[in-house]
Image: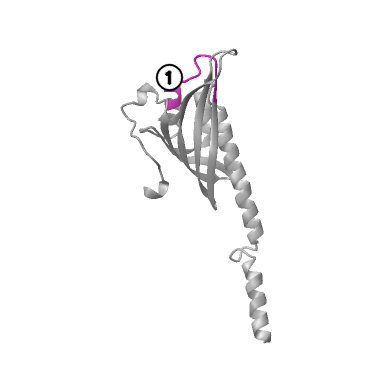
Amino acid sequence: MKAGFVIATAALLLAGCSEGTGETAEDAAEQVLLDKMAIADLLNRYYEGFGTDNAAAFNDFYTDDAVFDVNGIVANGKKEIEAIYAGLDEDGEAPTNVGTFHMVISNPVIDVDGDTATAKVLWTGIQNKDISAPPTFVEQGREYDKLVKVDGKWLIKHRVVVADSGLPPSMNATYTPRKDFSFDAK
């Protein structure tokens, strides 16, 4: 009877720890929540940059070797990613040319696994041309991100953007409809 009690007690104590690290399951769950909050904040700050003309500002959110696939146009590294955003502004395709533009993100699904994570969000672009006019929905789609934690900071390693409406004309040739996307399928 004593041996059974000792084994049961040891099992309960071990169940509360993460594989010899001294970290409890509660600590690990708390860290996951903190990481999810940090990733949600990263995405919110990223989308806050839309409607500005500072294409370089997006670089702060990516790893140096990041991949950005936006409607079939693939950029490798920060310079190429910056060029995509700068090109949209230069071509007059960015919806910031008239009035005020806001990008709204919704339905975030964030999964954290240690120092890696994935995130999926829906995005909707809203144009306000005039203070007396109603807002206009100009684009909508989905985003899929693979993220990594580098020196305690979450960064985007791979981003896939899929438009469901409002596709810029410069992307007509590269766009392929995708019902859904998964990094696991690659």
Asked whether 152 falls inside the magenta stretch, the response is no
Q: Nearer the viewer, residue 3 or 134?
A: 134
Is any part of residue 152 visible from this angle? Answer: no
Residue at x 54% of width, y 41% of height: 108
Residue 58 locus on image (x, y percent): 51, 30
Q: Is residue 51 left or right of residue 8?
A: left
- The residue range painted magenta reads 84-102
Residue 89 found in image quarter: top left
The residue depicted at 40 percent of the width and 26 percent of the height is 167
Q: Position of residue 153 (x, y in %)?
A: 58, 42
Q: Is residue 100 magenta?
A: yes
Q: Disc 1 residue type?
A: Glu
Location of mark 1 (residue): 93
Front-most of residues 79 and 45: 45
Would residue 23 be found to the left or right of residue 79 on screen? right
Q: Return the residue nearer the eye: 176 or 21.
A: 176
